[in-house]
Image: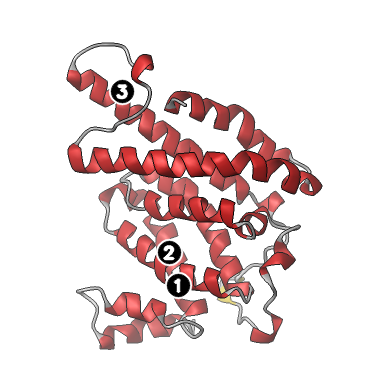
Amino acid sequence: MEFRHTRQLVHSVLIPLVKYCPSDMWDIWLEKLLHPLFLYSQQALSCSWSSLLHEGRAKVPDIHGIVAGSDLKVEVMEEKLLRDLTREICLLLSAIAWPPLNTGLPSLEQSGHIIRVDMSSLKDLDAFASSSMVGFLLMRKGLALPALRICLETFTWTDGEAVTKVSSFCAAVVVLSVTTNNVELREFVSRDLFSAIIQALALESNAITSADLVALCREIFVFLCDRDPAPRQVLLSLPCIKPHDLVAFEALKKL
């Protein structure tokens, strides 16, 4: 399917369906529709962005939809089609993280203060599957794996608008990694997501959303560094971070 048609399908059909689908129909409708979309989008967007970033030209399947013209005009149109679809897929992920669809997610902070998570209160991930659409998605690996891969890659795709949209979904994923006892999810957030967000902070295109990205890094470090060694390992792997620099990060847990 051409990128422009996929974008229209997501915008006009799937996002409204996600927002207003009854929770007892999530399993029947959403999994069947979102699974092929996420698989296709992750593979197609990854290929096109790799071409754009390394070869200077996005390769999109909209050959017949691009009006013939100079090479420069074609390149500009291809990049626009790529960015439009990228942003729409990220908007879909943002819709999945829409607060009314995730009423079961607790807050990690209250009145500006960090809430200490009682380890004995951690729940299984499936406990959130009916009260959180993000929890529902993460319970199904066929949906979760391509969706999470899209999140990681979006942070490298030099599109600040897409990053802004996907950040709310990542924030919900972080909350679930903190409040559940799911080891795979915790490890993904502690290492993969934490690393990707830090790398995103180095891109000029993400300057507009840097405050949100720093807040995500803070939550991951504060809530998970005592349960998983990865956040400290990721920080120490950075060329500008030395062991004594971790003292400042450790201070975040006391705020």
* Label 1 secondary element: helix
Q: Nearer the viewer, residue 31 or 93?
A: 31
Q: Is residue 50 in sight in this rendering?
A: yes
Residue 151, placed above or below residue 35: below
- For mark 2, does the 10 Å Cα neighbourhood hold few (<14), some (14 to 19), or many (20 or more) residues? many
Judge left or right: residue 133 versus residue 2: right
Q: Nearer the viewer, residue 131 or 115?
A: 131
- Residue corresponding to mark 2: 193
Label 1–label 2 contact, CB within 8 A: yes
Residue 123, placed above or below residue 27: below
Residue 169, placed above or below residue 67: below
> Which of the labelled discs sits on residue 175, or is there none?
none
Q: How far across and how far down the image is residue 18, in percent?
A: 67, 41
Q: Nearer the viewer, residue 42 or 91?
A: 42
Judge left or right: residue 141 versus residue 222: right
- Residue corresponding to mark 3: 77
Q: Residue at x 25, y 73 (%)?
A: 238
Q: Is residue 90 in sight in this rendering?
A: no
Q: Quadrant of residue 137?
A: bottom right
* Label 2 secondary element: helix
Q: Choose the circle earlier in sequence order: 2 or 3.
A: 3
